[in-house]
Amino acid sequence: MFESLTDKLQGIFERIRGKGRLDEKTVDEVLREIRLALLEADVNFRVVKEFIARVREKAIGEEVLKSLTPDQQVIRIVRDELIALLGGEAEPIRWATRPPTVLMLCGLQGSGKTTTCAKLARWVKSQGRNPLLVACDLQRPAAVKQLEVLGQQVGIPVFTPQQGGTNDPVSTAQKAFEFARTNGYDVLVVDTAGRLQVDEPLMQELERMHTVLQPQEVLLVVDATTGQEAVNVAQAFHERLALTGIIISKMDGDARGGAALSVKAVVGKPVRFIGTGERPDALEPFYPDRIASRILGMGDVLSLIERVEQTLQEEEAKRLEKKMREASFDFEDMLAQIRQIQRMGPFEQLLKMLPGFSQIKQQLGDMPIDDRALKRTEAIILSMTPQERRHPEIINYSRKVRIAKGSGTKLEEVSALVNQLFEMRKMMKQMTKLQQQLRKRKWSPFGRRR
């Protein structure tokens, strides 16, 4: 997600690197290119206009801060405005003072709503709560069965119409609420009906269900790949249901990200979660500051660390975090974590959280970045000597030839992997240095709020 926009923005910042001052002409040139990049990313044109105006107001006449280059100064301003555009501080789920909390999900057919329900219930369970899935989509054939299968996959029970003795979705929802209260379930995740388009019968049914359940959260699931149409759908639903937030599904299939960048400004409701794949755990809370860092090519080290902490022992996670911040990764570390990485999700998604991913991708060229690449990486590392793994700087041409033969890979692949490691070290070192320079400010390249 955001790959296209990230590449364009990094190219823009690269061209102003080395200038001594942000004069008005330079700012106007940069903003024209940023404006075009945002429009090409399918961001709403009114949102782009207002965003550019705010950045220009802050950038014109600003002296380059001590120890900051002009590109870093522009990045600082653009990042601050991106965070504001995306919603500022992340909003937590509103839990009911008297359980059960009701999370009502709605959306059009094909948006990934039912799958998202199961992912959200899994996330709720990871927060130490006891969720119950509720099947209230009685319009689409096999929707109830789909939710039951998904519920089994994530280990969460599903309340179905058969249990309630009725095929009316509103009655089913009401009986599910009573069942949850008497059986110790403290969160209801309700899957509602969808249509191919927004229509009056759909809205009336959802309004009746809203009246019965009085949900703490009304979350609209929209498909990222539909671009600005997702924003239009969000507007239509919000007018009738008073949404509390948006979940953007299929973000892994959208390289532009226009919906995520537009929806808060247009609809006035924050993005709460994003779907990043088909796996049951491929749902991430939406943190505006971390997403802004990803867009600007700074990576999202904090989210990566959190994902690592879910699969590693606490002590090992601290050691890995220290390695990342010191930019001292070696191939022993990569080998030691490679099997853990496979449990954290698709390899490409993890790499995208690292600073400088676009540069790494350019280094790799046509080499695929997926789980097969992870296995080939393992083979290459296993063909190195222990000394080469700990001291990759000694890997010269002849060593690369030997490693390629031993791993059954091409010389180019070995070179790309070595270059990748050094590029990661370089970018992390730059981010650490920038973080130290801006320590007195409220933001950090690693995403931690000061």
Image (cartoon, helix red, strand yellow):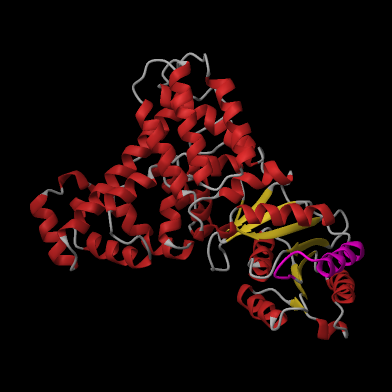
Specify start and end residues of the magenta stretch as a single range. Answer: 194-213
Q: State whether residue 395 is above or below residue 107.
A: above
On the question of residue 397 being in view, the answer is yes
Q: Residue at x 49, y 38 (%)?
A: 36
Q: Viewer-proximal residue, 199 or 398?
A: 199
Left or right, 333 with respect to 162, comes to left
Q: Residue at x 66, y 40 (%)?
A: 87
Tell me where residue 299 appears, x and y as whole percent. Answer: 45, 44
Q: Viewer-proximal residue, 283 or 36?
A: 36
- Prevailing SS of the magenta stretch: helix
Left or right, 440 with respect to 408, comes to right
The quadrant in which the C terminus is found is top right
How many numbered discs, if any? 0
Q: Viewer-proximal residue, 283 or 319?
A: 283
On the question of residue 353 being in view, the answer is no
Tell me where residue 271 appears, x and y as whole percent. Answer: 66, 49
Q: State whether residue 361 is above or below residue 225.
A: above
